[in-house]
Amino acid sequence: MKIGIVGAGIMGLASAWALARRGHAVTVFDQGPIPNPVCSSFDEHRIIRHAYGNMRGYALMMPEAFAAWGRMWDDLGRSHFVPAPATYCFRMEFDWYRHVSACLDHMGIAYRDVPPDEVARDLPMVNRDGLFRVVETHGSGLLMADRIVTDLVRALPAMGVDLRPHSRIAAVDPERARLDGWEGDAIVVAAGAWVGQLLGELPEAPRPTAQTVVYLEPPADLAEAWSRAPLLLNRLPVASGGAYILPPLAGSRLKAGDYAHNDDGAPDAPRVPTARQIERVMEAARLSLAGFERYRMIEAKSCLYTVTSDERFAIRPLGARGWLASACSGHGFKMAALVGEAVADGVTGARPAAEVTDWMAARLTDPILAEV
């Protein structure tokens, strides 16, 4: 098949990878450079984990997501996954443990409560004020996001993929598989925050939101502790819900972000975080880390997530010869390789379209642990 993909973020590139490895002729269009340093996918690292809170259906899909990344590592010739435990620090009541323990038990993933003396000894960076429970989970780590995107851009042309940077698409015709003068057998729209501009109103109502992260330089006396630190996920009684803090592993920098999806973002606006957005992240990090005044902010960045109200993927047909591949919340990256394979299944008819859509919306896996 001759397939056009709009968008060269991780979803578009992963879809191109999955289709090309099945022998199809793929062209990827992006309005900017490829890779595009301002796209949501181009960041130092992203979390991947089996612990998924109350989104049990997606938790049960994570073994398949890890397997899909393994297939991509095989094709790229190297892995961009750095294993590390994910340690959850709670300073508020949160209906998390019941869901996560059920899912991890079902999948055979290890987890444990970390006693206070061990927190004090092994996690000296953690602010212990108000801390009432710490849970360590395994089956997690970091995806080195910009390295994955860069390696895909290097590998895809050798797989026969035609990458077309600086090719802004203004018109999409999913009925006839046409894109501004290009015509093929099928098209995939994986345009992230621009999907509304391209397709108009959609039933899922995907909304671009500005997500701010800050990069920090830790105190010199904590450098060694940070070099072996887990992912730290902090639930806090603040408006943003808390902070996730990713350790500086494998040459990356220490990064903090929050859980808020409140800031609407304009796709064509500069990716410049406001002072309020930065301070919201810094407040959550300040409550999470001991002696936060000793940390220095190196950089603050913003990207645009595409969020749906139920935070589920929208992977579905568009017209007669098109497919929509839209992310949701922050799990767009961690499942990207699996999404690419799902898109390939849908476009080529390897699986029924409705099954692909329901699977990526976790409607096939949700019921499995509904009663646990």
Image: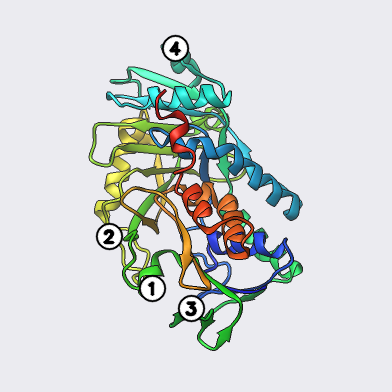
- Residue holding disc 1: 199
**Tags 2 and 1 touching, CB below 8 Å:** no
Spatial separation of the CA atoms under disc 4 and disc 1: 51 Å
Instruction: Give the residue type at disc 4.
Output: Pro
- The foreground one among 330 and 1 is 1
Q: Position of residue 310 (x, y in %)?
A: 33, 48
How is colour applied across the structure in the image?
A: rainbow
Quarter where residue 210 is shown = bottom left
User: Is residue 15 shown above or below 174?
Assistant: above
Label 2 Cα neighbours within 10 Å, binned few <14 / some 14-19 / many ≥20: some
Query: Is 121 left, or right, of 150 in this rendering?
Result: left
Q: Secondary structure at mark 3?
A: loop
Residue located 52% across and 51% down the image: 355
Q: Earlier in the sequence, mark 2 or mark 1?
A: 1
Instruction: Give the residue type at disc 2.
Output: Asp
Residue located 51% across and 37% down the image: 247
- Residue holding disc 4: 115
Spatial separation of the CA atoms under disc 1 and disc 3: 13 Å
